[in-house]
Amino acid sequence: MTNKSGQCLCGKVQYKISGLPISQGICYCLQCQRSGGTFGSPLIVVLHKAFDCSQENLSSYKTKSNRGSIVTRNFCRECGSHIYSQISDVPEIVTVKVATFDDTSDFAPQYLVWVRSAPPSCTFPKDVPSFQENAPMEMLLSLGRASF
Ligand SMILES: [Zn+2]
Ligand SMILES: [Zn+2]
């Protein structure tokens, strides 16, 4: 999974990711459910400096996470697609919504977080470590690149 590109539904927001992701997983938290309109939200963690996104058609919305940090969700102001988020206490990374990639074929989640917020009808990928709530931030940031 290198040099990914992606876009919003209308195409006015475009981005490129250079290099390899730090980690990738699926979040089932209620905030991701509401903002994404889906139970599970596939995301990758990448270095902010590796993420090159057109800014002129973006809007953002801030929420407080249960870690106490401020999460800024950036979405297309034209079509509403949620593209990426920033977390106030780890400004060096961004999380990008994998479903906006041009090619999602090699997405391979390494963890599932907030599975307790998923409805009973939700099915989960097999053999992926899952957490009832957050996984340790250190884990999300240190899974390493060897597994990609
Ligand atoms: Zn758009
Ligand atoms: Zn979430």
Image (cartoon, helix red, strand yellow):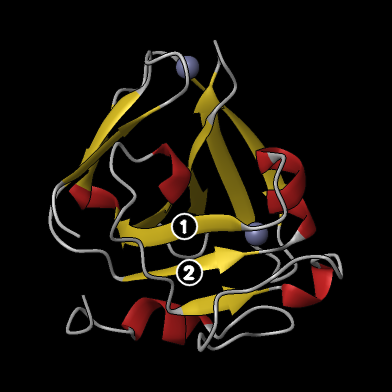
The residue where tag 2 is placed is 25
Q: Nearer the viewer, residue 128 or 55?
A: 128
x, y (%) of residue 35? 70, 40
Judge: label 1 CB < 8 Å from ligand 2: yes
**Side of 147 where 113 appears, left or right:** right
The residue where tag 1 is placed is 43
Tag 1 and tag 2, C-beta contact below 8 Å: yes
Q: Nearer the viewer, residue 10 or 66?
A: 10
> In the rendered view, would you say 55 is above or below 102?
above
Q: Is residue 113 visible?
A: yes
Secondary structure of the residue carrying tag 1 is strand
Q: Quadrant of residue 72?
A: top right
Disc 1 marks a residue whose amino acid type is Leu
Secondary structure of the residue carrying tag 2 is strand
Task: Please tell me how crowded label 2 is: few (under 14), some (14-19), or many (20+) other residues with Cα within 10 Å.
Answer: many
Q: Quadrant of ligand 2?
A: bottom right
